[in-house]
Amino acid sequence: MLDKGKDAAVQTDAKAATPASCFNLTETWVLMLSLMQKELGPTACKSWITPITPVRFEKGVLELSVATRFIRDWVKTHYAERVRHLWAQNFGMIIRVDIVVAQTATPAAVQEVAAPLAVQRTESQPVADSLSSPLDPRFTFDNFVVGSPNELAHAAARRLADGDDVAFNPLFLYGGVGLGKTHLMQAVAWAMRARNPQRRVVYMSAEKFMYQFVRALRSKDMVSFKDMLRSVDVLMIDDIQFICGKEATQEEFFHTFNALVDQNKQIVISADRPPSALEGLDERLRSRLGGGLAADLRPTTYELRLGILEQKRRMLKRDIPQGVLEFLAQKITSSVRELEGALNRLVANAELTNRQLTVEVAQDLLYDLLRANDRRVSVDDIQRKVAEHYNIRISDMHSPRRARTVARPRQIAMYLAKALTEHSLPEIGRKFGGRDHTTIMHGVRRIEELVVSDHGIQEDVEKLKRAIAG
Ligand code: ADP
Ligand code: MG
């Protein structure tokens, strides 16, 4: 499991740590510690497990470091397999656990997981592998909860993962932060690699693409960079909005894109907005990007959030009261990432302090997070502020009155509700006295026009935005 010479190869390398995924090793390790403690009891855990520092988790290999060779050998023979097993059960895919001796394992370094050590890699890596960013082992289809906001995107991803043909090119996934774009893309990558290990599936962020492009330019190595890219079977680029406005990178991406499409290779792209809304993007590229299937991940619903939390509870094998999950699903509406972070924090805290998890404890521990979510704008706020500003009654927001003096402010409130909240048009319609979504759409459009043509309205809208945000 571990090669002998490895401890000599330990070295610090800041660069290797930069393309960090959002996977939080420190948090995961805290959970691992508590799982190990349950299994081994406090004494053994304190002697052998607590002194371990998690170094990195990459390509399914969990790397741990300890202070001496003796501890390494002991941990390796007695606990490594246990760690691997628990990890697989609770956090997903893992290939093996490597244990290395840290060169300068001072107590401070043991605590400092934020600056991980890197270990020289000995195995030779195939081309696609070195080009691809590591995949997060939790980002699989099994761990992806499907609900109405992500149904289409999920179905499209599944279709690609289950077939060998090119179904739609490209698949363009878009949606706000933390709604599952990266998870879904990597799920496709895992599934494709599992289905056919020969298929060269490259996943990388647009940022990494740009970085590699610039590096190839500098080292006058463009030809091999291009060859490498064009030799892949499936190319996935995450967060393409990063290359908007970066002309040379765009140009290269465009050529690669065309070459791959011509060879009938599959491309998957993600962005924080639809192709039509990508600014600073070459027109040809934009229309090509929109030429396949664009599927959006919409803001989560309460049901989806609860479903995700329940799934997470199963994975963690924790006894978390349903009421706590419902509380979180109701209160933390911004992104799934925040939702998961909140749950992890609760579990880690409860483990460490031995407190029973209740809604009160959750309220207490997540005070800051809950406040930030509360501060998000509601349609009621908007209606109140707009009514104040124009000196009309709040009830006029719901009433059928069509007099210009109330109709225009009402439209402004609709426009702001669309711009500043994540509610859908039908949802907004309900909050405006049960109006139809087409009425809301009409109001929003009207104000969009006026903001451009009418200076007074533009000022009002700006002022209101500031008042609502403050
Ligand atoms: P994005 O790339 O859209 O910003 P991510 O894919 O990184 O978002 O998702 C953020 C976090 O939320 C990840 O930990 C991911 O596993 C989780 N997540 C998002 N959507 C789902 C879902 N439908 N089911 C399970 N987990 C999800
Ligand atoms: Mg992402």
Image (cartoon, helix red, strand yellow):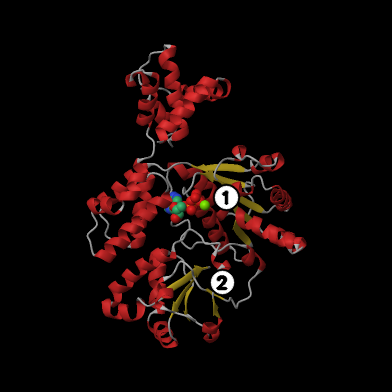
Numbered label tally = 2
Q: Quadrant of the C terminus?
A: top left
Q: Residues within 10 Å of mark 2 (few under 14, many from 20)?
A: some
Secondary structure beneath label 2: loop
Q: Position of residue 413 (x, y in %)?
A: 42, 25
Q: Position of residue 388 (x, y in %)?
A: 36, 23
Which of the 4 image quadrants contains residue 404? Answer: top left
Q: Is residue 442 above or below residue 273?
A: above
Which residue has dot 1 on it? 239
Secondary structure beneath label 1: loop
Which of the 4 image quadrants contains residue 72? Answer: bottom left
Which residue does the image show at 47% across and 41% down from the upper left? 298
Q: Position of residue 439 (x, y in %)?
A: 46, 21
Give the Cα separation between the discs numbered 1 and 2: 26 Å
**Which residue is the extreme one toward the top?**
403
The disc at residue 13 is 2
